[in-house]
Image (cartoon, rainbow, N blue to C red):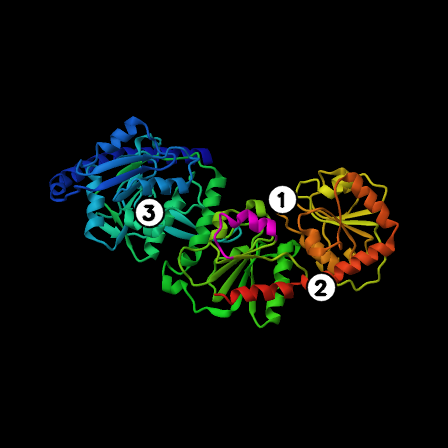
Amino acid sequence: MKKVKSTIRKAYHFALGIYAGHLRYNQERSLQKQLTGSSNNFSLANKTIALVMLPGSDTSKASLDRISSALSGKSNCIFINLPHKDVTFKEINIAILNSEADYVFLLNNVYKVSAYFDVVLVSELEKNPQTGIVGIPSYYSPISGRSRANLIKQEGLYTEKRSGKKYSLPHYSIKARNSFKPNWLSEEASSSEVIPSTDFVAMSIKTFKEIGGFSDFYNTNYMTFPLADLCLNSNAIGHDNKLLREAICAANFVNDISTDDKRQNREVFRGRWFKYLSSGADIKASKSPLDPLSIDICGPMPDNDSAKSWGDYHYALALKKAFEKMGYKANIVSREHWYDKSDSRFVLVLRGLRPYFKSPVNYDQVLMYWTISHPAEITPGELKQADYVFYPSKLMQDHFESSVSVPSSILPQCTDPDIMNAEGTCSMTPELLFIGNSRHVFRRILKDLLPTEHELQVYGREWDEYPIVKEHLVAEYYDNSKIADAYHNAAILLNDHWDDMLEFGIISNRIFDALSSGAFVISDDVAGIHELLGDSVVTYKDPDDLKNKIDYYLEHKDERDEIASKGHDIVVNNHTFDNRAADIIEKMGQF
């Protein structure tokens, strides 16, 4: 039945397309006749136009000739050809600025354009300084397939909010007006549209510079969101964007865009524009009076019961408690609500699994980053958004310092001694304990340890791929409220670090929690651990060293207790959430 309906729909669109083809032909002839005389009254002398063929566009000689033939011949036009999808927006911005053009025309898979289109676009930009970006209606090109050819593709666009169970995060999609219709919605020469087009837009080089060009966060494989971003940016800084109907273009249908590319660009767009669009694209409505004693703590955990299994959630909870002790209001913000309207003066991003994208609209909030995990996924561009960055290690600060000119300081991870405080009697069981998820990786310390003759208990998820570990698996989850006793009661708590944490010298949060609990810890050797914590953590270099140290310390309880006691004192005096909140508040005082 579905196949029959699809066939009928395609046949219907094909018939509409034949009719629409006649409409397009007559309209283009009418526009050409109308503009032939009026174009002589408008001078483009000494004006340079950069025609930018965006990634994925056809840049063959036939294609460029087809577009060139529609120019008025009154201006100096240069093509900037960017056919390869692996080009970055940074490179595109540089190419546009280096062109020294007066106007920038951005063509996204455009097949052809109606005659004198350069006159139509530039005359509007010249006559009305308040106009920021102009676009023209588009229809599907002849090579877009029989069921699409000649039908309307875009006559302006609008945003539509999406949320609910079907969507992982609330966001805005971009929809074309009048799509798949045979005729245009309006005969007006022009109309105001926040997003006039994502097929063909034009602006002065001055406006392009004001906007700051394309955002580097987008990938160039899916152009809808980056082009809509330019239009929204133009609108947000006070320009009026327009759809001009005295020119039209044919644009190709593109069907080879990956879901991942779309998802990435949608998430960037969400971060940059969700708050603005939620307020009806009204800057005044999207701004609130800010509370200087309020801070939003943005973590990557979801807004549901599963958040309790995220270490980031418990980290944010402990930090909230520390801020509130010092007279601040602290709000834990899950990833679904990062970009909601807020009256907090300060935003602290606990950079974990997901990147955070700052709005180009100035909301007067102070954005601070604490890069506590997943350092290999963090880019200099993301950190450049911040007003202040807290790095968890000197090694990480040194890594980014040359490329990120944002004030920063070192702020290692920490613990909450009120929670990480063993209350039960010490049973010293098991001999060895490891609590952690696999993430489909054979964790280093377990790989170096197993097989072992000692009693080992493992708690965590995703260990099915490693039967030798699963033999020791007790449960997939350990209640965080009872974990301090588990740490304390084990003779030896085993700890390791993810590869990127080792590379950047980030000491695991578990180390601080364990020492606060009075645990004796053996860990892999991460840069800076002994400088920060002295000899309170025993580290090993290889499997033989690990085995020897486990055997030794299981036989020397007094030494274990002495080392654990020393670690407890170091951590509860220097590395608590209260200590870290005080450091953050001190930096907040700079703004």
Query: How far, Cα to Cα, is label 1 from label 2?
Result: 27 Å
Q: Are marks 2 and 3 in contact (CB under 8 Å)?
A: no
Q: Nearer the viewer, residue 119 or 553?
A: 553
Is residue 396 part of the magenta span, yes or no?
A: yes
CB contact under 8 Å: marks 1 and 2: no
For residue 269, say whether it is visible. Answer: yes
In this view, which residue lies farthest toward the bottom? 327
The nearer-to-camera label among 3 and 1 is 1
Q: Residue at x 21, y 53 (%)?
A: 128
Q: Characterize the local packing of mark 1: few (<14), some (14-19) or many (20 or more) Cα atoms within 10 angstroms.
A: some
The magenta stretch is: 393-407
> Which amino acid does the dot numbered 3 rest on?
Arg
Of marks 1 and 2, which one's residue comes earlier in the chain?
1
Q: Position of residue 82 (x, y in %)?
A: 36, 35
Residue 127 point in image, percent of width and height: 19, 51
**Local secondary structure at mark 2:** helix
Residue 177's label in the rendered image is 3
Q: Are marks 3 and 1 in contact (CB under 8 Å)?
A: no
Q: Nearer the viewer, residue 113 or 415?
A: 415
| Residue at 30% in and 40% down | 99
What amino acid type is highlighted by mark number 2?
Val
Badge 2: residue crowd in 10 Å (few <14, some 14–19, many ≥20): many
The residue at which mark 1 appears reads as: 503
* Residue labelled with disc 2: 572
